[in-house]
Image (spheres, rainbow, N blue to C red):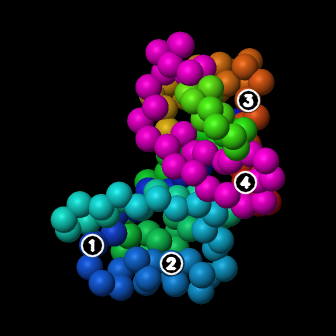
Amino acid sequence: MYVKQISVFIENTPGKLAHFTKLLGDHHIDLVSLSVADTTHFGILRGIVADYESAVKLLSENGYTVKLTDVLAVSVPDKPGGLAWVLAQLAEHQIVVEYLYSFVRNAGDHALIIFRVDRLPEAEKILLEAGVKLLSQEEVRGL
């Protein structure tokens, strides 16, 4: 049960991020979550959009370099130690978390966290067996 994440290189200059988000908005593509890691000249934008197929096409047509990556959208109890418990499930099986970022949209008493791990199928199995709720692409679209 994976979710498609877009990764986009964006020049780290005034207005580039505004242009990117406006482009999506003008085409009614909902940006569900967003993380930007920057360097001196470029940033790597990682995000979940409601319609990744349309987003990839639109962004590619507008000169952006776009990559799709499978990630896990994990519902984590929103309380002290909730994330630590989920991370412990992965660590126990030597799963490396390459990065993660959170997003919140009507999550109730849970935080929603995007996980990129080194062994995706194994991580999915481990978390499901531990009773952790993973969200599907459709569930994320509906948030």
Mark 4 residue crowding within 10 angstroms, few (<14) / some (14–19) / many (20+): some
> What separation in Å lies between label 2 and label 3 (alpha carbons)?
32 Å
Q: Quadrant of residue 26?
A: bottom right
Label 3 or label 1, whichever lies nearer to me, is 3
Give, as a single range, the part of the protein colored magenta. 88-115
Dot label at residue 21? 2
Quadrant of the drawing holding the N terminus? top right
Question: Of the residues under marks 3 and 4, which one precedes in the sequence?
Answer: 3
Give the percent coordinates (x, y) of residue 22.
52, 84
Instruction: Give the residue pinned by disc 3.
Output: 132
Give yes or no for residue 11 being in the magenta stretch. no
Compute the Cα span from label 4 to label 2.
Answer: 19 Å
Residue underneath mark 1: 12
Q: Residues within 10 Å of mark 1 (few under 14, many from 20)?
A: some
Pointer 3 with pointer 4, Cβ within 8 A: no
| Kind of residue at badge 1 | Asn
Residue bearing the label numbered 4? 140
Query: Which residue shows up at 33% across the image and 69% down it?
Result: 10
Image coords of residue 130 (percent x, y): 72, 19
Q: Residue at x 65, y 43 (%)?
A: 73
Q: What percent of the width, then of the height, locates residue 57?
A: 53, 68
Note whether 46 is above or below 90 in the view shown: below
Mark before the other along the chain sequence, 4 or 2: 2
Quadrant for the C terminus in the image: bottom right
Contact check, label 4 and label 1, Cβ < 8 Å: no
Determine which quarter of the picture holds residue 126: top right
Mark-to-mark CA distance, 2 and 1: 14 Å
| Picture coordinates of residue 21, whole percent (x, y) | 50, 78
Numbered disc in front, either 2 or 3: 3
